[in-house]
Amino acid sequence: MASRADNIASNLNLGNFAKATELRQRIWFTIGALIVFRFLSFVPLPGVNPLILSELYQQTRGGILDLFNAFSGGSLERMSLIALGVMPYITSSIVVQMASALHPTLAALKKEGASGRQKLNQYTRYGAVLLCAIQGYFLAVGLESFSAQSGLQAVIDPGYLFRIVAVINLVGGTMFLLWLGEQITSRGIGNGISLIIMAGIVAQFPNFAANLFEGGRTGAIAPWIIIGFLVMVVVLILGISFFERAQRRLLIQYPKRATARGMMQAERSHLPLKINTAGVIPPIFASSLLLLPLTISQFAGNSVDTESTFGKVIVTLNQYLAHGQPLYMALYAIGIIFFCFFYTAVVFNPEETADNLKKNGGFIPGIRPGKRTAEYLEYVLTRITVLGSVYLTIVCVVPEAMIAQTGIPLFLGGTSLLIVVNVTVDTISQVQSHLLAHQYADLIKKAKLKGRMR
């Protein structure tokens, strides 16, 4: 027989929004914050000509800037105040996580609980500010040099004053986005930083869809290619939804304990291990490393001598690492698999998990606590990570192969789909949790009223 909780969960529907006042306020706050984010993406940096800048950006397509531009909702293409988006914070948080797993001092902070996490979060912010300043400066210098090389002067008054102003504005824009993300997390619904990234990606969907169907109307793109692309997107979304929610649940048993009625009862629980523990980090790292040489050559301008050894290496790498080339596809797949195993080893420590289970009296049936449990956890995690890495490789390489075969300027890669699907699923789960809590609150109030009447 279904429990009361199961019945409530099965009866969740959109009609309950009318009664959940707090949930509606949180949703409206989230929508308002995302609208502010979109408005800021159209505010250009001081001293930059947006019209000429759009022409310059068309000449730099294909590098790592496309990845950052997709995550910032086109802000980098328009060189807005939030051109760097939240990527410096994401990079800083990844570095701090890796350092906390490798450095003893940071590892000790991680074990201190809330105070330790607060300290690590503070280090992450310092790192984000430093990365913003460095990336902002090189972005300003690269914009000046590329403008001089192409003959299109996007910077009205080049010089150190422009670079200082650009760095200050870019750092301030990223810090404002971080504050806005925190406000969404605390006062809205869902994870604020993730929602900002997803909003930037989704904002480019209409333009891409319009260009895709316009190409089909004019005959530039064959109808079967458009149909095949739509089928591929649907299949990838279904596959991502399945694998991101897939878990290997290990049975955890605790010793028998006395209940309120004096009976001895053994408690059971489950340790969920995700198939894709690394998330979207592997494709981001792999694509960033592969696209870095192309980006350097595009923004270095005349400072790189193509006749020198370094210049020849850069030119050769650009030829073999172009989108759709066999070497690029192979290295991309290898990079994803490598970072899957590497980042999974960083975020999940089998020995620490086994020690925590042993301290709490828990054990896996048939496995001795301690070292044997850690070895078993590592064995299981390695096997499911193989599946996770293969799944990520397919999701990310298939769109790249389609770009190479059809020539469609496809910005909607596997990484973008991963982020959109993951954030959407997480947000919907939080909405359902709020609705469920609201219905439980109503149930408790009715029970109290009946108790008073008696």
Image (spheres, rainbow, N blue to C red):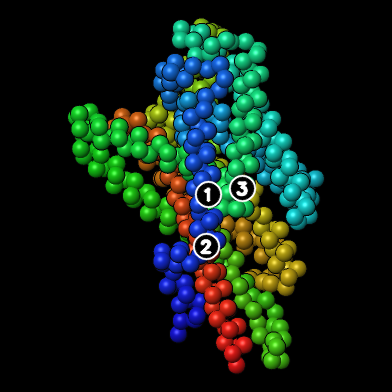
Left or right: 166, with 231 as reference point: right
Residue 117: image tag = none
The x, y position of residue 267, in whole percent, is 64, 79
How crowded is the residue under tag 3: few (<14 C-alpha within 10 Å), some, or many (20+)?
some
The x, y position of residue 295, in whole percent, is 51, 22
Marks 2 and 3, Cα distance to the nearest angstrom? 19 Å
Give the mark nearest the N terminus, 2 or 1: 2
Above or below for 208 versus 240 = above
Residue that badge 1 annotates: 30
Comparing labels 2 and 1, the label whose residue is closer to the camera? 2
Left or right: 110, with 173 as reference point: right
- Residues 33 and 75: in front is 33
Q: Does residue 144 appear in the picture of this structure?
A: yes
Q: Which quarter of the image is occupied by the C terminus?
A: bottom right
Identify which residue is drawn at 69% across, 83% down.
Answer: 256
Marks 2 and 1, Cα distance to the nearest angstrom? 14 Å
Marks 3 and 1, Cα distance to the nearest angstrom? 9 Å
